[in-house]
Image: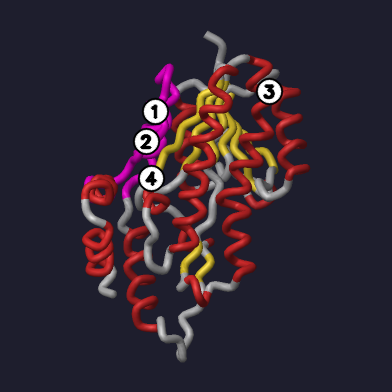
Amino acid sequence: MEQKVVLITGGSSGIGKSIGAYLASKGLKVYGTTRNAEKHPDFRAFDLLELDVRDAESIQMALRALIAKEGRLDILVNNAGIGITGAVEETPHEEILKAFDTNFNGPLHMAKAVLPQMRKQKSGLIINITSIAGYMGLPYRGVYSATKGALELVMEAMRMETRSFGIRITNLAPGDYATNIASGRYHAPVLENSPYKEAYGRTLSLMNEGVEEGGDPAEVAQKVWGIIKINNPKVHYRVGSFMQKFSLVLKKLLPDKVYEKLLLNHYKL
């Protein structure tokens, strides 16, 4: 069987690096992307390409280089993303747009850019790394939830549109994992005179604890490998702790106000 070629955005650290290393150990030819390769001179897990998902020209240049070298692209893992927290009212709108540019527009640009090659091959798989947070409007994470929820929906549509070309598209929503996402996350400042000061401060502490105490990102990598081996993947997959996945079951079953009360109690709001 021909060695499958995989491209993972945001592959230099965190979940992306874990996915890449795991897939490389399974014999796949892995390329990861980073905005600045010079920052990773000692990176040896797999090949890195310079690519910024916010820049259409950057995407095309990287894809041309990859296709010229390998002649094909079998799997795209849309992993690159950024975190953002804050009360919606107090989050600067330019930061909201930046979050959508990376978490929504970026994966969409990537998917659109790889479709011609996959259509030419009459095969391909796109795995979008979304988030369990994308299934609910979480307080002080509303913008992040919205970016991931929007990605889930647009990829549901693209999955149906590209089905006849032999291209498979699926979404994988992780819960909290121990990565460095908190270090690169935009935090709207906790303002001294803000009406949200106490509630936002408490919620921010809970969010940071969730990341620090999160699961091993290798679990996400194993889930990705499992999806790759399936001929006809489902529309949605989730990976995370029992309670994180169970929260989605509760959201389907419970009345909206009851579920909202659970969130309010969890965040002590």
Residue at mark 1: 234
Magenta part of the chain:
215-244
Q: Is residue 191 left or right of residue 50?
A: left
Describe the element under mark 3 as helix, strand or loop.
helix
Residue at mark 3: 117
Q: In the image, what residue occupies the spot 37% across and 36% down?
A: 237
Numbered circle sitting on residue 174: 4
Q: In the image, what residue occupies the spot 60% across and 32% down?
A: 31
Q: Amino acid at mark 2?
A: Tyr
Counting residues from the start of the chain, the first of labels 4 and 2 encountered is 4
Task: Pick whichever, 171 or 79, lies toward us.
Answer: 171
Residue 167 x/y as whole percent: 55, 22
Residue at mark 2: 237
Residue 29 visible in rendering: no
Q: CA distance from mark 4 to mark 3?
A: 28 Å
Residue 29 x/y as whole percent: 57, 24
Describe the element under mark 1 as helix, strand or loop.
loop
Graded by Cα atoms within 10 Å as few (under 14), some (14 to 19) or many (20 or more), the crowding at tag 3 reads some
Q: CA distance from mark 1 to mark 3?
A: 23 Å
Q: Amino acid at mark 3?
A: Gln
Residue 75 x/y as whole percent: 55, 26
- Look at the image and say whether residue 237 sits in the magenta stretch: yes
Counting residues from the start of the chain, the first of labels 1 and 4 encountered is 4
Residue 83 visible in rendering: yes
Instruction: State which mark lies toward you, 1 or 3.
Output: 1
